[in-house]
Image: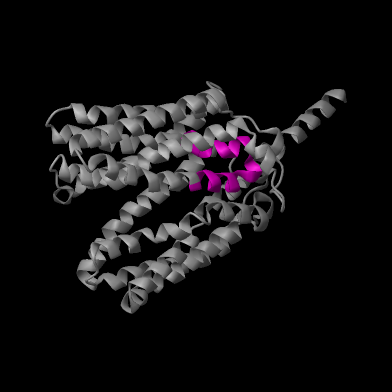
Amino acid sequence: AYNWSAETQGIVLSSFFYGYGLTQALGGYGAGLLGGKLVLGSGLLLSSALTLLVPRAAELGAGFLVGLQALLGLAQVGRAQYTLWAKWAPPLERSWLMNIADAGCTFGTFSALLVAGFICQSLGWPLVFYIFGGVGCAWCLCWFLLVYEDPASHPWISAGEREYIVASLAHQGSSHGLSLPLGAMAKSLPLWAIAIACFCTDWLFYMLLTSMPTFMSSVLHFDLSENGLLSSLPYIGNGLGHILAGLLADFLLARRVLGTAAVRKLFSALGMLLPSIFLVAVPYIGCSSTAAVVLLTLALTIISMTGAGININHIDIAPRYAGFLLGVTNTLGIISGIIAPTAVGLLVSQDPRAGWRNAFIVAAALNVFGLIFYAAFGSGSLQPWAGGETKLKLLLAEKRL
């Protein structure tokens, strides 16, 4: 619609992340202080309202759109949902419930792309932002009317369900106050294990997400636009993978086949090791573009297994700080998402085929390192600095009685 250079388009598209990286930890911290309902609802309302302004900002010029995109990034506080899950999701249902929410993000992206294309062709591109922004504002009304901060304040659930949820989460304590045990967090090996594993797996994920179309077109000479089903498979597979991983993880926990730490490490291993193997295999399968596309699609699909592993391990070890901690590790993921495409560009600039092979090997090696570190130091137990000491004292007191 506008005759902007490729450089300007790149700046506009990337400006969203200027704000996005700043509010991940702040959103989680704010949710712990003010409540997840208020923070998430406010973020959704602000994001929807700003979306309505995108066409006007584009008319005013690229500079206005860059600023608006940065503000849209600031409004993304979705990771604060973990503060709500810490109050609502019983340990034996946690994996499934939280992965359904993550799958919603994937299916939402897929659906939005399909609907946006139809709206653009039939009604014009500005209507995409007006419709999506309007729907978001309307949904905010439903959010504030229907969502409650915790089971105790919900007027409609049964007494039995309320008691079950509250009792299953009684050991973890309430939301945090103004202060955070930052020193203890910095010394926590289980937390470092999650952070390093998240950085490594996000490197692979963002590299695939941003660079796979380039690899397919420049190396495999495969036009994704000619096969809409194939281009949508990673989204469908990733969403279904999240749901399946959550169901299997909770099944193993409920049947006591494995403990929490073992389940988290198992699904992290599946989501980090298998995509790494597929990635390394791609440059060595010859001229079969179909096989390469299948391997890359499988890698993006199976990486969703980490949804029942490292991605929700924060809430196992520190439920009262889960929103803040996920914001911190998500910020690390954003950093890796910025570095990874840049590294790919440097590697493929001289010799594309050798460069892509090296880029895949680097991503796979990082994932293997992250998995080994997580397997060695990861935990599924409530940490002392997150309320574990309180739980221990209660147990000791009961024994004395």
Residue placed farthest to the top in the image? 257
Residue closer to the observer: 17 or 384 = 17
**Which residue does the image show at 32% across and 40% down from the upper left?**
237
**Which residue does the image show at 59% across and 39% down from the upper left?**
315
Please state, as top left, top right, bottom left or bottom right, where the C terminus lies in the image.
Answer: top right
Residue closer to the observer: 62 or 149 = 62
Image coordinates for residue 187, horizontal then vertical, percent: 65, 34
Please state, as top left, top right, bottom left or bottom right, where the N terminus lies in the image.
Answer: bottom left
Question: Residue 229, can we see it?
Answer: yes
Report the coloring of the rendering.
one colour
Image coordinates for residue 215, horizontal then vertical, percent: 21, 42
Q: How many marks?
A: 0
Residue closer to the observer: 202 or 395 = 202
- Residue 246 lies in the magenta-colored region: no
**Which residue does the image show at 70% across and 43% down from the upper left?**
181
Q: Is residue 184 above or below residue 74?
A: above
Magenta part of the protein: which range? 307-331
Image coordinates for residue 354, horizontal then vertical, percent: 21, 33
